[in-house]
Image: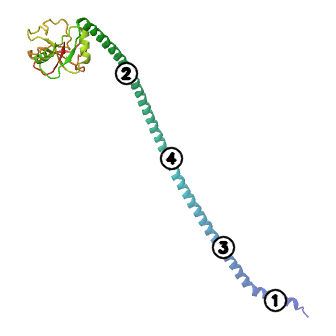
C-alpha cells in the first residue's frame, strides 16, 4: 500500500497556506498603512518644525536688523551730540578767552585811571596849598556861588551885595582849582560889553590869558558879550584849562563870586 501520511501532511500544509495566506497579506497591508501613516505624520511634523524654525529665524533676523538700525541711529545721534557739545565747549572757551582779555584790559584801564586819580588829587592838593599860601599873602579869599539863576549883570550885583564881585581868573592855578569843583555853568567876571572884542575883568584889568573851549569866543549872533565857565566835561574840546565860553548876557545861570 502507498504511504498516505506524507500526502495528508502536504494536504494539510497546502490547506494551511490557503487558509492563512490572505490574513497574512491583510496584516502586512495594515502594517504598511500604519508605517505610511506614521511616516506622513513625521513628515508633517518635520515640515511644521522646519517652518517654525524658518519663522523664528526670520523673526530673529528682523529683530537683529531693528536692533542694528536702532544702535546705528543711537551712535549717529551720540556722535551729533558729541559734536554739538564740542562746538559748545569751543564757543565757551572762545568767550572765556575774550572775557579774560576784556578783564585784563579793564584791570589795566582801572590801574591807569587810579594812577591818574592819584595824580589829580595830588595836583589839587598842591594847588589848594598854593592858593592858601596866596590867600595868606593877600588876605583870606572866599569863593561862593549864587543860589539863584540870574543874568550876568544881576549875578554881579548879587556878588556885590554879599561883599564881593564876580570872580577874576588870571592864573592857570586858579583856573584849575575853580574847574575842579564847578558842577554847572557859572558867570565869571569877564565881558566885552564896553568894547566889542576887548575882554576886560570887573576890576577893569585887560584879559591877558584866556582858558577858552575850542573855537571860542565866537560871538554867536554878534551878541555874546559875557563869559561863563562851562563844566560840561563831555563837550568836545573841554578840559580844566579850556572851559570858557561867551554867551548872551541875558542868559539865566548862576554866578561864582569871590571876596
Q: Contact, CB < 8 Å: mark 4 with mark 2?
A: no
Residue at the spot of label 4: 72
Label 2 and label 1: CA atoms lie apart by 141 Å
Label 3 and label 1: CA atoms lie apart by 38 Å
Residue at the spot of label 2: 110
Give SS at disc 4: helix
> Residue 193 or 31: which is nearer the viewer?
193
Q: Is residue 59 left or right of residue 39?
A: left
What residue lies at 50% left-to-right and 50% top-to-bottom? Answer: 70
Q: Position of residue 242 (x, y in %)?
A: 22, 13
Q: Quadrant of the N terminus?
A: bottom right
Callout 2: few (<14), some (14-19), or many (20+) C-alpha neighbours within 10 Å? few
Looking at marks 2 and 3 on the same chain, the residue that comes earlier in the sequence is marked by 3
Looking at marks 4 and 2 on the same chain, the residue that comes earlier in the sequence is marked by 4
Q: Position of residue 121 (x, y in %)?
A: 33, 15
Give SS at disc 3: helix
Looking at marks 4 and 3 on the same chain, the residue that comes earlier in the sequence is marked by 3
Camera-nearest label, 4 or 3: 4
Q: Is residue 183 left or right of residue 92?
A: left
> Residue 227 or 131: which is nearer the viewer?
131
Residue at the spot of label 3: 38
Residue at the spot of label 1: 12
Label 4 and label 3: CA atoms lie apart by 50 Å
Looking at marks 3 and 1 on the same chain, the residue that comes earlier in the sequence is marked by 1
What residue lies at 34% left-to-right and 16% top-to-bottom? Answer: 116
Label 4 and label 1: CA atoms lie apart by 87 Å
Q: Position of residue 35 (x, y in %)?
A: 68, 74
Q: How is the image coloured?
A: rainbow
Vertical comparison of 93 with 152: above or below: below
Amino acid at each position: 500500500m502507498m504511504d498516505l501520511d506524507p500526502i495528508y501532511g502536504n494536504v494539510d500544509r497546502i490547506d494551511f497556506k490557503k487558509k492563512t495566506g490572505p490574513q497574512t497579506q491583510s496584516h502586512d497591508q495594515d502594517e504598511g498603512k500604519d508605517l505610511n501613516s506614521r511616516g506622513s505624520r513625521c513628515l508633517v511634523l518635520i515640515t511644521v518644525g522646519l517652518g517654525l524654525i524658518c519663522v523664528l529665524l526670520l523673526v530673529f533676523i528682523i529683530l537683529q536688523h531693528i536692533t542694528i538700525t536702532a544702535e546705528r541711529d543711537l551712535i549717529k545721534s551720540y556722535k551729533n551730540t558729541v559734536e554739538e557739545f564740542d562746538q559748545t565747549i569751543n564757543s565757551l572757551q572762545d568767550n572765556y578767552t575774550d572775557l579774560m582779555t576784556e578783564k585784563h584790559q579793564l584791570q589795566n584801564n582801572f590801574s591807569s585811571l587810579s594812577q591818574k586819580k592819584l595824580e589829580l588829587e595830588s595836583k589839587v592838593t598842591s594847588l589848594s596849598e598854593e592858593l592858601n599860601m596866596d590867600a595868606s599873602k593877600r588876605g583870606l579869599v572866599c569863593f561862593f556861588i549864587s543860589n539863584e539863576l540870574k543874568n550876568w549883570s544881576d549875578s554881579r550885583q548879587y556878588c556885590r551885595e554879599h561883599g564881593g564881585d564876580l570872580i577874576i581868573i588870571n592864573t592857570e592855578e586858579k583856573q584849575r582849582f575853580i574847574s575842579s569843583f564847578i558842577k554847572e555853568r557859572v558867570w565869571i567876571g569877564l565881558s566885552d560889553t564896553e568894547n566889542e572884542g576887548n575882554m576886560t575883568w570887573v576890576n577893569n584889568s585887560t584879559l591877558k590869558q584866556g582858558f577858552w573851549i575850542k573855537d571860542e569866543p565866537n560871538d554867536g549872533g554878534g551878541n555874546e558879550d559875557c563869559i561863563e565857565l562851562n563844566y560840561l566835561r563831555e563837550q568836545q574840546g573841554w578840559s580844566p584849562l579850556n572851559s570858557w565860553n561867551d554867551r548872551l548876557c541875558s542868559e539865566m545861570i548862576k554866578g561864582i563870586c569871590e571876596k
